[in-house]
Image: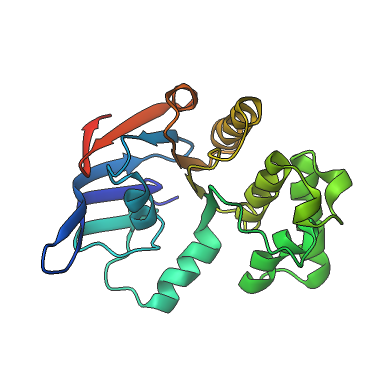
Amino acid sequence: MSGPAIETRGLGRVLPGEVPVTLVQDIDLTVAAGEFVAVTGPSGSGKSSLLYLLGLLDLPTAGSVRIEGADTAGLSPDQLAAIRLSRIGFVFQFHFLLPEFTCMANVEIPIRRLGRLSAAQARERAALLLDSLELADHRRKYPDQLSGGQRQRVAIARALANDPPLLLADEPTGNLDTRTAHLVFELFGTLARQQGRSVVVVTHDNDLAAMADRRIHLVDGRIVAD
């Protein structure tokens, strides 16, 4: 990796309008390789907005976002999409698994989109990921045949499909019971500490945030504690 996993300077996002709305402002943030970071703050503080900027799902109106040392300013939509597909994994509160596909097929989708592996290699990669998340017996099942925790683990496998160095998660435990939520956070910690991935997780749960290596707290779109 040629630099920090993520680095922002003066990052801001304002929604234009008759009364402009500031989502985040003046964010200076560096996330190192292998770091597990929790982002907390009250509702409306800009947590998800910050994550979408870090993941190149939204574009800033001020400042910069660098991914692995490379400035993303001025990149075309196709170039941004290519970075998201190959370098960033996303996990959301709602798993967004495609109900008409099996767990295996859901995990294979981003692998096939990237196109670096053959069909056989894509199947092998998907199977290994599901096995590593204790889902070997559920490969051929459909999402509606799984529990909430199992579906979220499939979503994590899909996020890891292209072996991204950066994993971003937005309230990934919001629909899970307490025990399963802790297991998911333990998994994120493992991905960071044992596999060297950078993991940034938005959560409203302070107990879960305490499991991360570092906690960033937002209020009114600004970092007030790090």
| Residue drawn at 85 percent across, 45 percent down | 136
Most foreground residue, 132 or 221: 221
Whether 53 is drawn above or below 156: the answer is below
Most foreground residue, 81 or 204: 204
Count of numbered labels shown in the rendering:
0
Q: Is residue 186 left or right of residue 19?
A: right
Residue 115 in sight from this viewpoint: no
Colour treatment of the image: rainbow
Q: Residue furthest left?
A: 18
| Residue drawn at 63 percent across, 48 percent down | 156
Expressed as whole percent of the image width and height from the top left, the position of residue 82 reads: 49, 70
Q: Is residue 208 left or right of residue 221?
A: right
Residue 133 in sight from this viewpoint: yes
Q: Quadrant of the C terminus?
A: top left
Expressed as whole percent of the image width and height from the top left, the position of residue 49 reads: 33, 52
Most foreground residue, 193 or 203: 203
Expressed as whole percent of the image width and height from the top left, the position of residue 145 reads: 81, 51
| Residue drawn at 32 percent across, 34 percent down | 41
Q: Residue furthest front?
A: 18
Q: Is residue 38 left or right of residue 191?
A: left
| Residue drawn at 20 percent across, 41 percent down | 220
Expressed as whole percent of the image width and height from the top left, the position of residue 124 reads: 82, 58
